[in-house]
Amino acid sequence: MKFFIRLLIIFALIAAMLTLIASGCEQDPEIDDEEATIKVGVVGPMGYVQGDHNWYGAEIAKEEINAAGGIEVGDQAYEIELVRVDTNELHSVDEAISAVERAIEAENVDLMVGGFRTEAVFPMTEIAAENEKIFIICGAASIELTKGRVDQDYDKFKYIFHLSPINTKDIAQLAFVKLMEIADSLREELGIAQPRVAVLMDRLEWADALVAGAEEAIPQAGMEHAGTWRPSATATDISTELAAIQDSDAHIIFTALSGPAAVTYGRQWGELEIPACSFGLSAESQKMEFWEATDGYSNYETSLNTYGKANITAKTMPFMEKFLETAGDTPSHSAATYDALYLYKDAVERAETLEVDAVVESLADTDYEAAMGRVVFSDFHSVTWGPEYVTGVANQWQDGELVCVWPYEWSPVEGVEITYDGVQPYKIPPRVIEYWSE
């Protein structure tokens, strides 16, 4: 009888162990339930504005989400843990690839956000896709990062999403909206019937499509193409290009500058008193240090951005204020890692699982009011641009203050006018008015 009782106890213990093992196998993959954390790799060139803003945006979102109870999956709440992934991608694609590989293999990250230099983001996202890791791009612009990949080889590239900035095709459309508004201002205020536009853009792959589009569209829009100049993204002297632009009698300089050369340009454009409006894309010009770095010579320079001091949504200004408090700076488009983490949280909680394919499907169905605007992804996982979605903004330096100047009375369709609360009118640089009024 004693032997029989011992046998029953042994069987009961074995059954209990099997139940525990089975329940453990049902946990969501790749997440350690004991730690209850989701590891997010923040991927970017740390020490530069692009990577630093990747980090600050993610850090603010992490603190807010964790303080509010984390990411809920059923009865389990997961906290976010950030992993700093310094890619050095402004200088080395190989180092960027190695950094992402280490993040996956050594740090075992569950999600990646960031990425800036297009030439590096292509192979970085390739590695993420091969390892079935979701990668939300916050920094690189090229439309080809998702179009031609997600839509043509979905099973492989479905893990890649493009959040900020809007893709190069949409950037071109947005840029030309504002470019034509500036041209109209010159026509109305200075009587310049056919403004001449100089194109000054990075000698890098991401800007190729913008250059080609600009050269084709400028004449079609009733303006003249004054010429194209493509300096290095790390140029320390752009005076030769600026002198040639002045000789071309350009009224507007249409820029796309992603690297440190933007600071050189901003200073020399003012120092040389080039009598042309400056407008385009410049990540460097979106940080508070830019004013001091250019000794104030960048006054009236204007650039597109994802965020501005305006009420794009109810979440925009609280984020702007928190970013300024945390980073001592205003957020560039790379800071969209903030919105990326909230999008991931929203997708996971709608999917009610951390299983990666289910989260991908949920992310693809996103319709979410973020700090940057209403986020809806296209069929190739690129954020949708337009008056009902993410519009982007344009910011202009006005006497030491970075002012949001677009959209201001924007009429994308008849009967519709868009101006966010806080947006102020664009100003033509006084020296341009003085020079072309003579």
Image: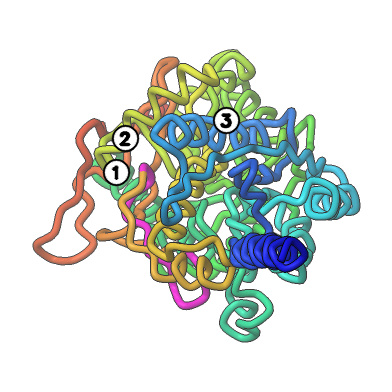
**Front label number (1 vs 3):** 3
Query: Which residue in the protein does label 2 denote?
Result: 426
Measure how far apart labels 2 and 1 are at the Cα level.
Answer: 9 Å
Q: Furthest-front residue in view?
A: 1
Looking at the image, residue 91 sits to the left or right of residue 157; the answer is right
Residue 377 within the magenta-colored segment of the rendering: yes
Label 3 belongs to which residue? 56
Callout 1: 10 Å neighbours few (<14), some, many (20+)? some
Neighbor class of circle 3 (other Cα within 10 Å; few <14, some 14-19, many 20+) is many
Figure check: 59 above or below 417 = above
Q: What is the spatial separation of the Cα atoms under label 1 and label 3, in whole angstroms?
A: 37 Å
Q: Quadrant of residue 56?
A: top right
> Which one is in front, 191 or 410?
410
What amino acid type is highlighted by mark number 3?
Tyr
Q: Is residue 175 visible?
A: yes
Residue placed furthest toward the left: 415
Q: Which residue is pictured at 54% across the width and 45% down the height?
A: 281
**Residue at image mark 1:** 185
* Vertical placement of residue 118 versus 130, above or below: above
> What residue is rendered at 74% in x and 28% in y?
47
Q: Mainly helix, strand or loop, the magenta region? A: loop
Provide residue 350's location: percent of width, then percent of height. Answer: 38, 62
Q: Residue at x 49, y 29 (%)?
A: 63
Q: Are marks 2 and 1 in contact (CB under 8 Å)?
A: yes
Q: What's under tag 2, amino acid-wise?
A: Tyr
- Please name whichever residue, 431 or 363, is drawn nearer the observer in this view of the structure: 363
